[in-house]
Amino acid sequence: MLPGILRNAHRIHDFATDMLGESGGTFEVKGPWFGDMDMVVTCDPANIHYILSKNFANYPKGPEFRKIFDILGDGIFNADSELWEFHRRTTLSIMSNAKFHTFLERVVWHKVEHGLIPVLDYFVERGIEVDLQDIFQRFTFDSICKLVLNYDPGSLSTDLPYIPCEKAFNDAVEALLHRHILPESIWKLQKWLGIGKEKKLIKAWEAFDQFLYPCISQHKVIEEQDDNFDFITAFRKACKETNVASGDSIEFLRDTFLNLMLAGRDTTSTSLTWLLWLISTNPSAETKILDEIEAKLHAKKDKKWRLFDIEESRKLVYLHGAICESLRLFPPVAFEHKAPVQADIIPSGHCIHQNKKVLLSFYSMGRMEKIWGKDCSEFKPERWISDERGGIKHEPSFKFPAFNAGPRTCLGKDMSFIQMKMVAATIIYNYHIQVGENHAVSPSDSIIIQMKHGLKVRTRSAGDGAAGGVSLQRQRRRRNHVTPGKVPSPLGGLAAAAARCLIATSRYHLRVNISVQRLNIDVVLGNSAASTISANINSIAMLNGSNFKDWKENVLIVLGCMDLDLAIRIEKLASLTDASSPDDRRNFEK
């Protein structure tokens, strides 16, 4: 098993999903005797429920977790027992404060108006590609810093400045995954030598400290002058009222705020990235979200984009469903790591000894047919909407653990939904997002499932003017696309590229349905679900002075579908021989 893990380290999440699918939802890993890598990997909801809820006390984070995530110190992610209870009680109290909700709304919309929209308009005007994942990471970094530290580092601006602390999160989460894969002795040796992923983690640690310590120490002067809501002041006050930690401990405050920044920056930005990609490749879902925005928020095509409050965001039911569906397929936290205090037998019948780790694969759960049905690979926001009332359909957290489950359920769940709705609605309504041609999309090899190569897109205004302008005459996006509901293959590409791949190898199978007005080509890769390239001939708009790019793309898709049809109809040519004529050779090469 270990050689297989090491060979597939570059696609560890999909490898684990394949293994879990073949083993019925749970399998054991036997590591080398010197590596302390014996573990049980599971995505079985019964096991998840048992470990995170029913027998919660037997599965603390433990010393092994703290050893791997040492960079987080005494923050909430590493804490157990009284320290964890203090963190949870204090953070929940602060986030439940009405002033905090008002502050959250003000911070998010300020960053949308003065950061997100100006930056996107900048790239729209120049017609150049932008990495949307990088934009979201900067957006959430600035927002969480303002919420927690009352300081806006200004990383989201048109010059896209390099801020070491903001980029350090990417290196940190990647290195932390490798600590789960490599034997402890190996990564500790790398740390001692200052090489490999550990070298990046050391630099990330330094960047965090250099950013956080000045913010915390300089805040001492600010807090006495500011009567508004202040997270640092509120947390310091709670520290002084308990014996868990000194209110003057700058190290403890550093650990606390770093944990909150990791949660606020990485999870939300990752969720937004996958959400926008899924929506941009599923135009039927995009159209429904646009209709909902117009109906529920009374958005007007000929007026400036209107900001909406937290209560209004709750009306966006279909968008909420789309976010849940994106989180099901791409939960930001790939897995949870647990270790039992006492030997235990989990519901699947596997024995968990004290020296064994348990990895709960949240990423794999969303891809299991026995959990979500045969359409588990499809992007279907409708699965989250109740047929009876049209409201949100709630799934148990041990089936949908995107925000963890049990007593450790994420405290920022509501805050994340609010922020994602505000950002997603702004972008979907005001801009047209087109993923870069031949841009590969796949999950990264880290504990946070970011996009490995970012999300390179071209943006253009959905109307005549820029998003911040007066005229926003939104036009419905008419473009050929992967059939609504299918999660596109990371391979991407248009019909012409697909034709070359499909004809070149027998590992692919085609199903072609041809009528007068529509050509459908189902592309089946191995045993995976089919993806369909559709070309509606009548949908191609007449060429005018402003739509050449879309017109050309639509025509190429239709021609690509016709080429595929022709390639399938033409009889396969015989292999070349020494007696083959020049014409035979030319035809064979074609």
Image (cartoon, grey):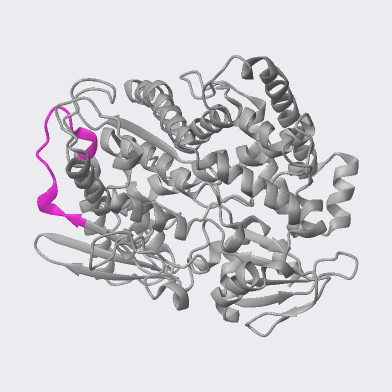
Q: Which residues are magenta?
A: 535-550
Q: Residue at x 22, y 48 (%)?
A: 287
Viewer-side residue, 533 vs 97: 97
Q: Quadrant of residue 364?
A: bottom right
Query: Measured from the top left, where is residue 378 in percent x and y?
Result: 37, 64
Viewer-side residue, 108 vs 29: 108
Q: Is residue 319 left or right of residue 345?
A: left
Q: Residue furthest front?
A: 241
Relative to 69, residue 119 above or below: above
The reply to whether the magenta stretch includes residue 175 is no
Q: Quadrant of residue 296?
A: top left
Q: Is residue 8 left or right of residue 479?
A: right
The answer, for residue 22, to whether it is visible in the render is yes
Q: Residue at x 17, y 44 (%)?
A: 295
Q: Quadrant of residue 170?
A: top right
Relative to 266, residue 60 above or below: below
User: Which quarter shows the N terminus?
Assistant: bottom right
Query: Measured from the top left, where is residue 42 in percent x and y?
Result: 62, 72
Relative to 324, residue 224 above or below: above
Total labels drawn = 0
The reply to whether the magenta stretch includes residue 542 is yes
Query: Measured from the top left, where is residue 117 in percent x and y?
Result: 36, 25
Viewer-side residue, 577 vs 40: 40
Q: Residue at x 23, y 68 (%)?
A: 388
User: Which quarter shows the C terminus?
Assistant: bottom left
Relative to 211, residue 252 above or below: below
Q: Is residue 575 left or right of residue 186?
A: left
The answer, for residue 439, to whether it is visible in the render is no
Query: Measured from the top left, where is residue 99 in percent x and y?
Result: 47, 32
